[in-house]
Image (cartoon, rainbow, N blue to C red):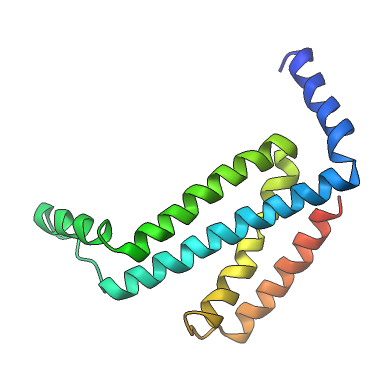
Amino acid sequence: MSDGVAGHYRLRAASEVGKPNTMILSLLLVLTSSLLGVSGQILLKMGMDRLGTLELSGLPALAQTVAQVFTTPVVLLGFGCYGVSSIVWLVVLSRLDVSLAYPLLALNFILVPLFAWLILGEQVPSLRWVGVGIVVVGVTIISRT
């Protein structure tokens, strides 16, 4: 990077990220992006559960599968959530260093099993919850740096 570009990033990090209100808003945007992404994942799963196992054996089956997937409203809504999540994520990246912002997406590893259990009724084994707890500790540490 040239000095001008590197200087821009140092200046932004020092002048914006350190302000409490800016950081709180940025963290809320990360949470919003994460929740939208997780909602998209849950909606995609709900849509695929309705469709059943997809067959990908040959071109006709692939065409039928694509038609089924892209005409299922819940799947389309899931993709929509992902799209909006991506737009919010662009706002996050404009405000935070990627070295801080991206690890915070580990929230997804917490929220997906939680929502899958609450909304989809999936059985989440105890050992998986232990792993989720470890991720919570990691996200907490990262968010405080």
Q: Percent position (x, y) of residue 122?
A: 48, 83
Q: Which residue is depicted at the point 83% across and 59% down? A: 141
Q: Where in the figure is residue 51, as x and y percent of width and height?
A: 26, 71
Q: Give percent across and percent down for residue 69.
A: 27, 60
Query: In the rendered picture of this protein, how many numbered marks are placed on residues?
Result: 0
Q: Is residue 71 left or right of residue 59?
A: right
Kindly give the residue lying farthest to the left in the view shown: 60
> As drawn, is 35 to the left or to the right of 136?
left
Question: Which residue is located at x 66 percent, y 59 percent?
Answer: 106
The quadrant holding residue 92 is top right
Q: Is residue 141 above or below residue 100?
A: below
* Res 110 quadrant in image: bottom right
Which one is in front, 103 or 78? 78
Q: Is residue 33 left or right of residue 100?
A: left
What residue is shown at x 36% (from left), y 62% (from top)? 75
Q: In the rendered image, which quarter is residue 96 located in?
A: top right
- Residue 46: x and y in percent read 39, 72
Q: Is residue 30 above or below residue 87?
A: below
Q: In the rendered image, which quarter contains the N terminus?
A: top right
Q: Which residue is more in the foreground, 131 or 54?
A: 54
Residue at left 88%, top 31%? 15
